[in-house]
Image: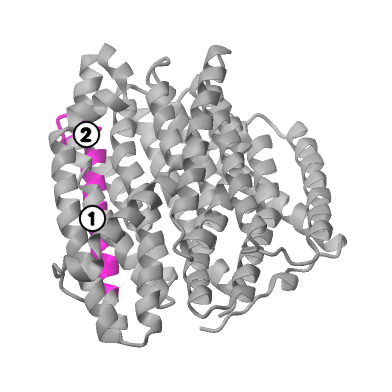
């Protein structure tokens, strides 16, 4: 398997998915603007989305993949298949009761997660209704994540990456064509989430037949070793949740600020998640399965080389991405969102949050590269401890920055600073225990990337000074200008790297299938 080719394939599909999500956000911003109703939806949707990121796409994937790889490596397909059917049965039962509890306690959950909404009873009631509608999304997307784990183990990386596109299509169609059929148009967003979740699950589940893993759920808690599984999943949830929990708490604090704060932070988070999703998730998807395979084969040299490869890719792409988002933050927000009810004031407020998040962009990606190094070894305890430390530091920073009146900028900065702490602790543990041994050439590579990034910064500042204002012209014209600017940035950076004698074939790395 050629890792660069696999990374490119996954990144292209992820790019299309993320681009479509921006189309979705553009439509939502245009139709609904920044208002009480959008704040209510973003708070309500953030809860099942948080559970999806932490439990389904995070902890459960990190725990289940090594277990399934262990069964697969033993060479008994029927045993692997039976184990998967038991996991599926366990998840269906667990998720059913979790969803039921979430729906019944929606009012309590909104009270705890958005206390600022109590000042506006209509907003509170709307958020509760939206949460009751969207909570079942957790059920379907978690089952979808389980099928992702199985497909990844068998080397099918691209199929699961396409899945989020279905959610984006569902949300766009509901908002554009069906919002008038609801008593409150914003409710169309809630129902679109459920429909999209069902599509995601069915789409991936049907592909399991290609690898003879299409099974019916079975209940057998004995084979799963439930007590051990629950312990590992519990520690895994804490281990992968530092950023997500901190973002969630920030949403609670943002609800205490002026109306619109929740939406401003949501749009900023969506923008910074674009490169994180394309690069971080793509790398994490590839690395977890391959690192687990290396551990199963007791090939620690390959294990270390895989981590080193992931870190190099992150530095080469992450540093210029941070610079582009930081320098072009206002043009990006203006071009993508400043239409209809989304005002210039909303752009300026969203920009503050985006600037804060951009400082931690590389850290967000590095966490997704380093974490599989622990979960592939079935070490859930260390990431859990580091995560707890990170969450505590985030809230201390939130308190400090709150008192210096930085508003939502302070909240985004606290996430960035604590994420860097998370990275340092994860890296230090792997390096100290000689689990990861850096390959030669790091200093030379880092110097080349810094010089090329500096050239990119100078070029961007120069071209921005000669370009017309970004809030003039048609939508197509502004999008075309922004596209040309991104293309210009890419070309400048690649030429600079080429002049500095960096060649992409230096990153070629192949592993056996």
Q: Circle 1 sits on which residue?
A: 140
Which segment is the magenta one?
180-207
> From the viewer's perspective, is residue 304 above or below residue 389?
below
Q: Residue 513 location, x and y as percent?
A: 51, 83
Residue 391, label in figure: none
The answer to whether residue 215 is above or below residue 250 is below
- Is residue 213 located in the magenta-colored stretch of the structure? no
Residue mark closest to the camera, 2 vs 1 = 1
**At x 30% / y 38%, what residue is drawn?**
47
Q: Are marks 2 and 1 in contact (CB under 8 Å)?
A: no
Q: Residue 110: x percent and y percent?
A: 25, 27
The x and y percentages for residue 123 are 25, 20
SS assignment at label 2: helix
SS category of the residue bearing label 1: helix
In the displayed structure, does residue 454 sit left or right of residue 223? right
Which of 34/512 is in front? 512
| Main secondary structure along the magenta-highlighted residues | helix
Magenta span has 185? yes
């Amino acid at each position: 398997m050629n890792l660069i080719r696999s990374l490119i394939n996954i990144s292209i599909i992820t790019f299309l998915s993320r681009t479509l999500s921006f189309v979705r956000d553009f439509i939502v911003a245009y139709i609904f603007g920044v208002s009480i109703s959008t704040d209510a939806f973003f708070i309500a949707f953030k809860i099942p989305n948080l559970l999806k990121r932490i439990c389904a796409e995070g902890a459960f994937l990190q725990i289940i993949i090594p277990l399934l790889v262990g069964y697969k490596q033993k060479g008994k397909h029927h045993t692997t298949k039976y184990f998967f059917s038991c996991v599926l049965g366990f998840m269906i039962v667990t998720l059913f009761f979790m969803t039921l509890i979430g729906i019944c306690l929606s009012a309590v959950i909104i009270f705890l997660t958005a206390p600022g909404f109590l000042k506006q009873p209509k907003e509170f009631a709307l958020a509760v209704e939206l949460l009751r509608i969207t909570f079942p999304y957790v059920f379907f997307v978690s089952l979808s994540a389980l099928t992702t784990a199985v497909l990844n183990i068998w080397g099918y990386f691209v199929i699961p990456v396409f899945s989020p596109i279905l959610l984006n299509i569902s949300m766009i169609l509901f908002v554009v064509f069906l919002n008038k059929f609801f008593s409150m148009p914003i409710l169309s967003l809630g129902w679109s989430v459920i429909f999209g979740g069902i599509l995601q699950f069915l789409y991936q589940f049907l592909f399991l037949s290609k690898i003879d893993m299409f099974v019916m759920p079975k209940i057998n808690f004995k084979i799963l070793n439930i007590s051990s599984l629950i312990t590992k999943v519990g520690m895994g949830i804490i281990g992968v949740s530092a950023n997500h929990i901190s973002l969630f708490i920030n949403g609670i604090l943002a609800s205490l600020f002026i109306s619109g704060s929740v939406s401003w932070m949501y749009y900023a988070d969506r923008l910074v998640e674009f490169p994180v999703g394309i690069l971080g998730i793509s790398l994490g998807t590839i690395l977890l399965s391959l690192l687990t395979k290396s551990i199963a084969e007791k090939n620690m040299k390959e294990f270390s080389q895989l981590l080193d490869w992931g870190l190099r890719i992150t530095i080469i792409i992450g540093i210029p991405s941070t610079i582009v988002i930081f320098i072009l933050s206002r043009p990006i927000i203006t071009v993508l969102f400043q239409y209809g009810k989304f005002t210039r004031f909303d752009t300026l407020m969203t920009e503050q949050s985006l600037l804060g998040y951009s400082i931690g962009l590389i850290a967000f990606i590095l966490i997704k590269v380093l974490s599989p190094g622990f979960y592939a070894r079935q070490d859930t305890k260390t990431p859990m401890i580091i995560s707890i430390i990170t969450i505590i530091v985030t809230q201390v920073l939130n308190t400090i920055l709150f008192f210096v009146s930085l508003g939502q900028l302070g909240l985004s900065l606290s996430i960035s600073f604590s994420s860097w702490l998370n990275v340092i602790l994860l890296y230090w543990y792997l390096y100290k225990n000689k689990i990861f041994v850096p390959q030669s050439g790091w200093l030379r590579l880092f110097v080349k990337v810094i010089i090329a990034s500096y050239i990119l910064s100078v070029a961007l500042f120069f071209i921005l000074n000669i370009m017309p204002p970004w809030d003039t012209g048609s939508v197509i014209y502004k999008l075309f200008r922004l596209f040309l600017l991104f293309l210009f940035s890419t070309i400048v950076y690649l030429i600079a790297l080429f002049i500095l004698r960096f060649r992409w074939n230096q990153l070629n790395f192949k592993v056996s299938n």
